Amino acid sequence: MGLGIGIYVLIYLVSPVEVLVPMEVDSFVFMAITIIALILGSRSADHLRLQARPRLTDPVRLMQLENRLFWSMLSLGLLGNLLRLADKYIMRGVGDVTGLDAREMLLETSGTMLSLIGGVLYPFGYLPIFILLGAKVLPRTRWRMGLASFIFLIPAVEAIVLFSRSFMLVSLAMGYFGAALTLFDGKALPRKLFLPLLVAVTVILSLSMVVFSWRLDQMSFDISDSIFMSGYAHTLAPNDKVQAIIFGDSTFSGLVTTILPILQYYVHAVFEFQILWSVQDTQTFANGALLFAPYVKLLAVFGIGTQADLFELFPRVGVFTTFWGPLWVDFGWMSTVVMFFFGFMARMTARASRARDVGAIPLYTYFCVILFFMPVVNFAISAQGMYVLNAFALFWFLSRRVANRAPA
């Protein structure tokens, strides 16, 4: 969390923007209180003992168990991804369009049962690479790593087709934190990962710029206009010096108009949260319907309850409001209880991961993703975060036979 907030502050300080909305002091008090609750929950987890020492097992037998776990998760993940693709591109007719047209078509058509089942199963496709990284005896052969990486990246590649950046950020962050945790004993910034991280960030930024350009082309927008007319431009605008570069004859105008939307995209959420907080007196609360949307969606299929209407919950829809925006809308001041539990679980999985519990590694990695991007977006909800958390929590339970063993 500290690393994510620090990087966010650094990016904001170097961003040539000015804030267009008034700051709500109470909103930062809310953030601070929930962070304190998170820390207290984390500290309380230190008073619980982890499981006993792992049982010594014949290495051949342990390899069989790890291999079975690898193929089981890979099969579930592949099936889930295939069902999601079939639902979108065959059942709902998205195969003939791309980008914003595809996203609009998905919004206008209801998901089928394939979508529901695929949404539950596809996160298991993230797990095979974690199994290989955390396995005690299963070899990391090239073909296994290649196959696991392919399944791991399917959601990110699909996101490019739909002009979405969230899944790309999630894949990058999970890959980095997972490698740091398993290969470098949990160091936040291991030196050997710096170059791969730099390359990955460069690729993600390049893809983000391309995706953003495609979006603007479909909306018949000029990129310089988006800086002043996009959703995040409502809270952040370029300062006078940058505006002079954009509208002048400077040789840097093209570079500025390319990079500035990415900076606005990354830092606008804190200021968008101010707009949300300014209407707290009339706020309608979702009572957990955002965080637990998969369960609400399942109940709605059987005619029990309805899904949350975002237009009733948020003054502005389609923009990030940090981690705390959806948290506030879901639980109000009861968010402190939720954050205490979140801190407790994050710490428990952290301790289990450092003890080489292969089942805890993916769940703790995703907790790291959520914590890192707290100033930007709530990845417990966005990018189908709860589906991922559900799958990873279930994996933690299913992997007990492997996690409780060590090679003799």
Image (spheres, grey):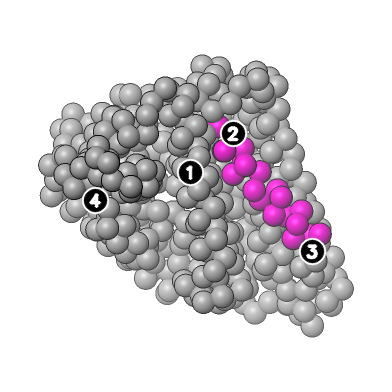
Q: What quarter of the picture does the N terminus occupy?
A: bottom left
Label 2 – label 1 distance at C-alpha: 12 Å
Residue 36: where, in percent of width, then height? 27, 62
Q: State yes or no: residue 158 in magenta.
A: yes
- Mark 4 or mark 1, which is nearer the start of the sequence? 4
> Residue at 18% of width from left, 29% of height from top?
282
At label 3, counting other C-alpha atoms closer than 10 Å, the crowd grade (few under 14, some 14-19, many 20 or more) is few
Regarding residue 73, the answer to whether it shows in the image is: no
Q: Nearer the viewer, mark 1 or mark 3?
A: 1
Q: Nearer the viewer, residue 183 or 278?
A: 183
Q: What quarter of the picture does the C terminus occupy?
A: bottom right
At label 2, counting other C-alpha atoms closer than 10 Å, the crowd grade (few under 14, some 14-19, many 20 or more) is some
> Residue at 18% of width from left, 53% of height from top?
29
Magenta residues?
142-162
Please give left or right for residue 394 compared with residue 250 in the image.
right
- Residues at badges 2 and 3 in contact (C-beta under 8 Å)? no
In the rendered image of this protein, does residue 145 appear above or below residue 91? below
Which amino acid type is shown beneath numbered disc 1? Ser
- Mark 2 or mark 4, which is nearer the start of the sequence? 4
Read off the residue under disc 1.
208
- Residues at badges 2 and 1 in contact (C-beta under 8 Å)? no
Read off the residue under disc 4.
16
Q: Circle 3 — which element? A: helix
Label 1 – label 4 distance at C-alpha: 20 Å
Labelled disc at residue 161: 2
Read off the residue under disc 3.
142
